[in-house]
Image (cartoon, helix red, strand yellow):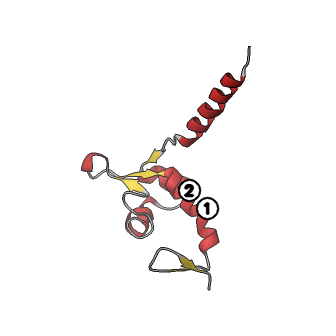
Amino acid sequence: MFTLVNFNFLMLFNIYKETVVSNTFLTTDQLAERIQYDARTIREQLKDSVLIEGIHYVRPFGRRKILYIWEKIETDILNAKNLAFAIPMANGGVCNG
């Protein structure tokens, strides 16, 4: 029998399930395939200027290997079109010209 308690539990479980985010970690070559950039361009031009360590990529166990976090990069790519004419401000905000 389906009761209100069961319904509430299912609602809470669905909310919890949606808040748990699993990250997709990609190598430089895998990221290059997804965003249609050359792997060398990512390493030499995007890394540390557009892609920031700790936000867009991590170095597991402090080693040389770099793993990119796809969800963070995808979010920034999709939000970049909204900020095309915005001027970044020192406090983290933007000025819309």
Residue at 57 percent across and 35 percent down: it is: 17
Residue at 56 percent across and 56 percent down: it is: 74
**Residue at the extreme bottom:** 97
Q: Nearer the viewer, residue 55 or 7?
A: 7
Q: Position of residue 33 (x, y in %)?
A: 53, 53
Residue at 61 percent across and 76 percent down: it is: 84
Would you say the residues marked 1 and 2 are in contact, meaning their CB atoms lie under 8 Å apart? yes
Instruction: Answer above or below: position of 85 versus 58.
Output: below
Q: Nearer the viewer, residue 8 or 53?
A: 8
Amino acid type, mark 1: Leu
- The N terminus appears in which quarter of the rendering? top right
The residue to which callout 1 is attached is 78
Judged left or right of residue 7, residue 38 is left
Residue at 61 percent across and 33 percent down: it is: 12
**Residue at the extreme top:** 1
**Is the residue marked by circle 2 packed among few (<14), some (14-19), or many (20+) residues within 10 Å?**
some
Judged left or right of residue 88, residue 14 is right
Q: Position of residue 77 (x, y in %)?
A: 57, 62
Instruction: Answer above or below: position of 56 versus 18.
Output: below
Instruction: Answer above or below: position of 46 versus 10.
Output: below
Name the mark on residue 7. none
- The C terminus appears in which quarter of the rendering? bottom right
Looking at the rendered structure, the secondary structure element under dot 1 is helix
The residue to which callout 2 is attached is 74
**Is the residue marked by circle 1 packed among few (<14), some (14-19), or many (20+) residues within 10 Å?**
few
How many marks the image carries: the answer is 2
